[in-house]
Image: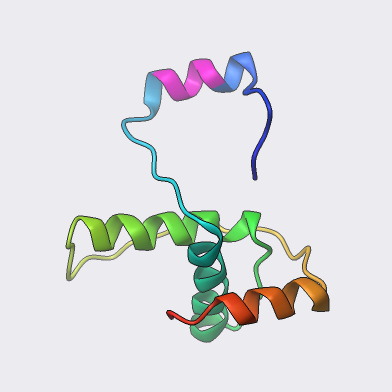
């Protein structure tokens, strides 16, 4: 999910509309994949799970309870080797 340089149009739109950014680490992404599987029986690829990981971190950091939240997910580019790695790292959800 990392790129070397952000595109000029993407930067312009984000600069105008984005209020804040959240960063997540590999373990948080793996936990989001596991959470999505446990909740909805979908296996997300790591880039597709970024929204879930970020949303979960935002909710925890801001101690939000009792709300309804939605994250956009995508991707099914997952093979068994990567799934094994995710399973080993996802111990928090």
Q: Is residue 42 visible?
A: no
Give the quarter of the image for residue 55. bottom left
Task: Identify the main secondary structure in magenta.
Answer: helix
Give the residue at x 33% y 61%.
Answer: 69
Figure check: 35 above or below 59: below
Q: Is residue 20 visible?
A: yes
Q: Answer with left or right where residue 5 lies relative to residue 68.
A: right
Give the number of marks.
0
Give the residue at x 44% y 46%.
Answer: 23
Q: Answer with left or right where residue 70 lies relative to residue 35.
A: left
Estimate the x, y position of residue 53 in percent, counting from the top left.
46, 60
- Residue range in magenta is 11-15
Q: Answer with left or right where residue 54 lies relative to residue 49.
A: left
Give the residue at x 54% y 81%.
Answer: 40
Give the residue at x 49% y 82%.
Answer: 91
Estimate the x, y position of residue 28 in percent, counting from the top left.
48, 64
Figure check: 26 above or below 9: below
Figure check: 35 above or below 21: below
Instruction: Specify whether residue 82 is painted magenta.
Output: no
| Coloring scheme used | rainbow
Of the pair 87 and 17, the residue shown nearer to us: 87
Estimate the x, y position of residue 6 in percent, counting from the top left.
62, 23
The quadrant the N terminus occupies is top right
Of the pair 87 and 10, the residue shown nearer to us: 87
Estimate the x, y position of residue 50 in percent, counting from the top left.
53, 55
The quadrant the C terminus occupies is bottom left
């Amino acid at each position: 999910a990392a790129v070397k340089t952000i595109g000029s149009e993407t930067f312009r739109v984000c600069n105008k509309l984005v209020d804040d950014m959240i960063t997540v680490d590999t373990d948080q992404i793996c936990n989001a994949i596991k959470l999505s599987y446990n909740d909805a029986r979908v296996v997300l690829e790591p880039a597709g799970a970024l929204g879930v990981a970020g949303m979960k971190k935002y909710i925890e950091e801001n101690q939000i309870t009792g709300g309804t939240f939605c994250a956009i997910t995508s991707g099914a580019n997952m093979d068994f080797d990567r799934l094994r790695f995710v399973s080993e790292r996802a111990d928090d959800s």
